[in-house]
Amino acid sequence: MLLVLPIIVPMFMAAVLLLIPWVRVQRWGAHVGALAQLGCGVALFHRVSQEGIQVLHVGGWRAPFGITLVADTLSSILVVAVGVVGTAITAFAFAGVDPRRESGGYHPLLMVLLMGVSGAFLTGDLFNLYVWFEVMLVASFVLMALHRTTAQVRAAFLYVTLNLLSSSFLLTALGILYGQSGTLNMADLSAAWQQNGPPRLHLPLAMLFLTAFGIKAALFPWFFWLPASYHTPPAAISAVFAGLLTKVGVYSMYRVFTLLFREVPSWVFVLIMVISAVTMVVGVTSALAQRDFRRVLSFNLVGHIGYTTMGLGLLTPIAVAGSLLYVVHHIIAITNLYLVGGIFLRLRRGSEFERLGGLYRTYPVLSVVSMIPIFALAGIPPLSGFVAKVVLVKATFAAGAYWLGAVALAVGLLSVLSMARLWDEGFWKPAAPDADKAKPIWPMVVPICALTLLSLGISAAAEPLLQLTSRAADQLLNPEPYVRAVLKEP
Amino acid sequence: MTTLILATLALAPLAAWLGGRSAKVATLLALWPLGLTVWFASALRILLQGGVVTDHVAWIPSLGLNLSFRLDGLSAVFALMITGIGTLIVVYGAHYLDGHPERGRFQASLFAFMAAMLGVVLTDNLFTLFVFWELTGFTSFLLIGFDHEKESSRRAATQALIVTGAGGLALLAAAVLISQVTGTLTIPELLSDRGLLTNHASYLPIVVLVLLAAFTKSAQFPFHFWLPGAMAAPTPVSAYLHSATMVKAGVYLVARLTPVLGGTLLWELPLVIIGGLTMLGGAYRAVQETDLKRVLAYSTVSALGTLFLLLGLGSEAAFTAAIVYLVAHACYKGALFQVAGVVDHATGTRDIRRLAGLRALLPQTSLAGLLAAASMVGLPLTIGFVAKELVYEAGLKYALSPFALVPAVVVGSALLGVCGLLAGFGPFFTPGAPPEGSHRASAGLWFGPLTLAVLGLLFGSAPGLTSGVFSLAASAVAGRSVEAHLALWHGLGLPLGLSALTLLLVALLYRARKLVRARAWPRSLGFERGFTGFLRIMDFISGRIGPPLQESSLASYALTFVLSAGTLVGVGYYLTAERVSLDGLLDVRAYELAISGLIILGAIGAVRARTTMTAVLCLGTSGYGVALTFLLFGAPDLAMTQFAAETLTAVIFVFVFWQFPRVDQASARLVKLRDAIIACGCGVLVTLLALDSATLPTTRRLSDFYAEAAPSLAHGRNIVNVILVDFRAFDTLGEITVLVTAAVGVVALLRIAAAERQGG
């Protein structure tokens, strides 16, 4: 029962919020919903770490006939992360999103989005995964388009069209897969392929999945939709997108490539390494010349996705553990930075560099609190990004992929440059003379402080976290317990 | 030691608070580093008795990354420099920045830096060293950019961060390689199996990476340019980080790893060559500068070169000389920087051409300057003299080529001596009037430099005081026991002669200083321009690739998606497919052909349509065709759903798009042709895949189960319905959510539109 709660709780809250016309009450409702989801996530995480992989056959229909929800270590970590991001965002939203969006259903839509993300992390069925992708897509599209300014509608249109293209690739893949194997339950597929060998078309199928999820994860050459759209919506929307949506694509890649496509020729994994490397280089390099706080973040977000998929290319336990640790760090840090971008939107009425500056002089404490995620994202030790980076460099060297390690290090340096400029332009340089006199308000500052503390906590608790992601990596690379847990007779 | 370091870091907020108050209160902060100095000094007793002090706190054991510290002679010398000079700098900084609105943050950064720097020199773990190393670079970034409203400060800060950061990453790579070869990261364990590393294939990359790290951090040619740039920092920072401590981290790294990696030509030759070049080049540039701080900055670059040169010589004498030179340099250069700061503070200028006759105005400072300059020139009774004697001795013993080396060292020392006079003697004792508006300096300002300068004199006149510690430090570098012979009087010999020659040269060159300055050629070798050029190139590339990634047309993005997916899947299919068997597929009825024709015609019509309306209707035709096939193949429910969906879509489209103009036909013929080819290619590919998967004997496990279980277990006779509302009800829940969400969006957009119409 616990397994379905992270999906059902936000859905229930979304339904309730749709019936409540008062925005203030909606804010509280959304926050309570997110907190409740976080609670369920933590409880699930606890259960998984105590009792191992959790399985729920929805409606009592055994796999592969019904839909199965599965929580292994990775899923449970990510569900907790969804709760954390949701809680931070709903707290931030007390400062107000724009009135149009709020009265147009921002809060219930956000709940739907959280529901979709949790569903994607928990499902054990590929068609069900497709459904959760649709839920996420429609919720995020409506959130983006609600404001109806030209730039935002254009961005939203681009976003939805390109993502629908990804959905159609995914659907094609599912059709062919079903035609080949007669089932879409991942554990069932894994067991059948293990026993009878993979079907003949598994290589083109792998490519279709790679493309479909690569688009969702914003890998090169499919990431255009992200920098073209993420800088337009307000912080309370872009932060949750940045923190969670691409990670669902990354997660799905890990799932299908470790459960299903284990037998593909090794060049496929080299291809994933190359794609990761090019994504890192192109993403972070493109960030350098951007003159807008949020655009810089968007491109860095893209670049850093490469770190999260490197592990899949290397496919060694330590590499996967490193990449997953990076995912955890990145969810917290990038969400936080988009929220910092929200502070700029309030104080300077924009995030273009010409409008920014002067924060370090006026708000030293807030600046230091923001400095931590900025330089954590850049990977400056001992802040949270560096542990994962050290693990990844170690993993690339150990696998003999020195070139990939060198790319990871060089991109790290470019990232430092990009983030140092962000700090320069946002905080250090003097404010424009006509800078607004608006002040940061508590609902904005509190979630930023909390996420910063979490970032610091990741460094301090690096060892248990690394053990955790190592366990998650182990479960991914040795899927037999997962398969057994799903398929075992009641 | 872990507690001490973490406490120093944790005291940073307190430092921000206390430091932000009056200079007197801020001075109290110096008690902490003073206490640390006492702690390390008392720990010396244990070291001199042959012990070591260790401390170990696990942090990330599975990475081998632990807070493990080990105090030996080398670490102790550095730790004492860091805490001792740190004490003086806290006092000096409190007075130097008195009244500055951000002085609290300055003290906080200083404490953070002190913690990081102590970490660098105390840890015995290479990963931990990397962590603290980067942290010193980061705190240095914050301190260089202290004057953050000036663009030049910010630029210098970023430049230093990037150059030393690159070195830090090299250090990380080296550490990973070392751990790969030896399976350990701690230095005592590395020492025990030395041969493993030097004979390994990874030895060359390890050496290159370690030296890269050291040379960038310690501002060696060709990475030296960031250090003069770092003079944008307030003077206390220049005195502390950029002359006495942080820039010596590279020297420390090389010294620390010499017993592990050293003893080979591959290790020593680059040290001698790069160190020697930097020594000469830095000293030459230093005497050409007119800004006091830049004179001192370049002379620091030169001194760091000398240190690397000494470490590269590889003899015990050279190691001893390096340690003594290190301490001597910290004393006199730390003092001279602070003197420069006092002069700047008192007169408002740092231009040595304008500074003269300050002795009466700044008596204590002038004494500090004089003593420090004497040590830098190398007058007897100063530690500078002792150090120089040792350097000459080591140079003369150099086996490879003393004849090239010794003259270079003499010239370098002479030029450095001139710098000492320019900074510590000239401003006070050059006859002339002080610049207008000059004022006196408070005790808090002259206390620091005078203490350091007197210490230099003390160490030089009583060498017995320090020789024990220096021996320990030199032993740590050599990896075996070394006895440092420090004496006031080394006896008559070649070194003494060389010292005398140096003094003569200093005197001559100082008299001719204006001439030297005028003959400034070449002023700069352009490595800084190289660095900014690199940044500009990166920005240029970034500026070229950024816009197309976010501002191109939707069509071009879609094209990329389809083309890349088509290529990948096509390659995958080509590699795995067998010939598609057409048996059983050619058994086609005429009406099936007709329906297929309808679908195809609909698609072609949609593509060629000139109005949106036509396109929608054509698509609807295709959709009806698909629904018909469902009907023919025994899925009437599905067909009905499809008919309903197609009809609804068409109706909605008609409602939404009836006012849209004709479809834009701007695409050129060639573009259309290209798109057509790609679209057809992908269509063929998907068809092949579909045919191929359809020819497989699919398992009927699921449909059999559904057929059986629907009536018996789920109590429903319509299997499709039972699947939707029971077997896979969770999917339906998700799809309902999609519909509701879309409806919410439509309602909200309509309301906004209505409000807009009313409002405007």
Image (cartoon, rainbow, N blue to C red):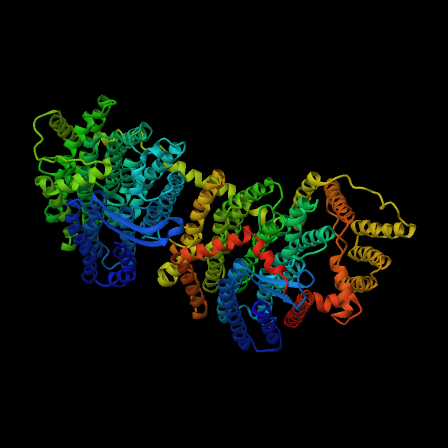
Determine the image quadrant of residue B14. Answer: bottom left
| Residue name at image x 35 percent, y 61 percent | A364
Residue A476 place in picture, x, y as percent: 55, 53
Relative to A155, B31 lies left or right: left
Q: Relative to B730, is A310 on the left or the right?
A: left
Query: In the image shown, does A387 or B280 lie closer to the viewer?
Result: A387
- State which quarter of the image contains the N terminus of chain A: bottom right
Left or right of B469 on screen, residue A121: right
The one nearer the camera, A325 or B162, is A325
Q: Is residue B428 visible?
A: no
x then y, percent, for residue B549: 58, 47
For the C terminus of chain A, give its image quadrant: bottom right
Q: On screen, A9 above or below B257?
A: below
Q: Could you tell me residue B535's position as x and y percent?
A: 44, 41
> Residue visible at 30% across and 50% down?
B68
- The percent position of residue B462, horizontal first and vertical second, equals 8, 41
Q: Quadrant of residue A152?
A: bottom right
Single out the residue that lies furthest toward the front: A489
User: Is residue B88 in view from this perspective?
Assistant: yes
Where is B519 relative to B584, above or below? above
- The residue closer to the viewer here, B344 or B89, is B89
